[in-house]
Image (cartoon, rainbow, N blue to C red):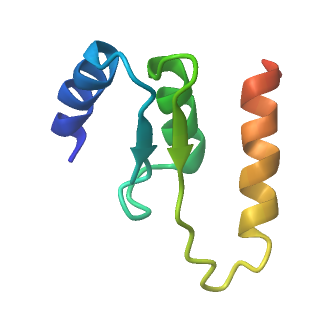
Amino acid sequence: MLADLAPAVETIQTIQKPCIGYKIMGAGRIDAELAFEYAFDNIKPGDVVNVGMHRGDNDNMVEENVALVEKILSGEE
C-alpha cells in the first residue's frame, strides 16, 4: 500500500488535466493528518481529494476531518 504512493504521485504530476485523489487514507490504515498532508503536498493546483469516511463509533468524524483539512490548508501548526 505505501509502496503505491510514489508511483501514484508521479502519475498525478504527469497528467495535465485535473485529477481526483481517492483512497488517500487506505481504508483507515493511514493516519488522517498524514494522509491529508501528503496528498495536499503532492497534488497539483486544481486537483482534489475524495475521501470516504466510516464514522463507526465517532459521530464527529466528518467535523474533525473538516477542521483538520482547514488547519492543514491554512498552514497552522
Looking at the picture, how far across and down is residue 71, in whole percent? 80, 33
Looking at the picture, how far across and down is residue 29, in whole percent? 38, 58
Q: Which of the two residues, 19 or 5, is positioned nearer the viewer here?
A: 19
Q: Which of the two residues, 8 or 1, is positioned nearer the viewer here?
A: 8
Which residue is most to the front? 17
Q: Is residue 25 above or below residue 10?
A: below
Q: Residue at x 44, y 62 (%)?
A: 28
Residue 72 seen from this side: yes
Q: Residue at x 60, y 41 (%)?
A: 33
Q: Is 18 situated left or right of 5 in this image?
A: right
Residue 77 seen from this side: no
Question: For the image shown, how many numbered marks are present on the structure?
Answer: 0
Q: Is 50 situated left or right of 75 in this image?
A: left
Give the quadrant of residue 23: bottom left
Looking at the picture, how far across and down is residue 76, in whole percent? 83, 22
Q: Residue at x 33, y 15 (%)?
A: 13
Q: Residue at x 24, y 18 (%)?
A: 10
Q: Is residue 56 above or below residue 3?
A: below
Looking at the picture, how far across and down is residue 44, in whole percent? 48, 17
Q: Is residue 50 above or below residue 73?
A: below
